[in-house]
Image (cartoon, rainbow, N blue to C red):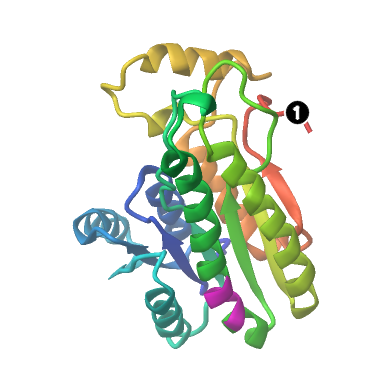
Amino acid sequence: MTLLNGKNAIVYGGGGRIGSAVATAFAEEGARVFLAGRTRARLDVVAERIRAAGGAAEVAEVDALDERAVDEHADAVAAEGGLDISFNLIAHGDVQGTPLIDMALADYERPVLTAVRTQFLTARAAARHMVKQRSGVLLLFGGAGEPVREFAVGGLQIAFHALEAMRRQLAAELGPHGVRAVTLRTGGIPETLPADFAGREAIEASIAGKTLLGRTATLADVGAVAAFVASDRARTMTASTVNVSCGALVD
């Protein structure tokens, strides 16, 4: 028996590196995956790969910052047998490498506003259906953490902290209805960096050097953990974070 057999899962940002890894893991565990994003071509590539491996995947162009588009898509998925899992992995448009005192207001606030808006819209759209069926899982990505000392991350960390506050409130309000809310957090995933990214090797070495295991989490690791957390085997987990950092983050 696969972990997610018979489940319907929406993955926003399903054409991205993390989104595609999570969607692939969900499909491998038996879920019917609904890939949502703004670029159809990228979604189609992921969907074709999932189908070629024997999985089930649907594609829809959805702007996860558009209230009406998010609501209509969630309604359509729910009409296909329910909405069991929602995971928002869209990019937040953060600018990194610039100290806060040198950063333009628009660059600082963009990831915060984007993260809060999109997570609210997608969580609300999914939870309305999950409450009715008295089951479901909202997954978030990022998590709170200590200030980054060696590199300027702009508003990204602030955005993650805002999402954690939202996740806690969602868990409190939705728990009585059987709906769970969990955050996955990592210490960094070098695979998300383009192969030609300047300083990639140094960044990877820095991330690995901070871990207790001496290695970094892979995209496949994140997907596997996400599939477990979304499954009924993790039914006791809510209002919590799951550490997928190889010990870079110590709880």
Q: Which residue was labeled with disc 1?
A: 250
Q: Is residue 5 at least partly visible in the picture?
A: no
Residue 40, quarter of picture = bottom left
Q: Position of residue 21 (x, y in %)?
A: 42, 47
Indicate the secondary structure of the residue bearing disc 1.
Answer: loop
Q: Is residue 201 at least partly visible in the picture?
A: yes
Q: Residue at x 41, y 64 (%)?
A: 65
Q: Position of residue 168 (x, y in %)?
A: 74, 58
Residue ranking furthest to the left: 41
Q: Residue at x 68, y 26 (%)?
A: 247
Q: How many marks?
A: 1
On screen, residue 118 above or below 101: below
User: With 131 as the anchor, is 53 left or right in this view?
Assistant: left
Residue 1, quarter of picture = bottom right
Magenta part of the protein: which range?
124-128
Q: Amino acid at mark 1?
A: Val
Q: Residue at x 49, y 62 (%)?
A: 118
Residue 12, quarter of picture = bottom left
Q: Is residue 126 magenta?
A: yes
Q: Residue at x 76, y 57 (%)?
A: 239
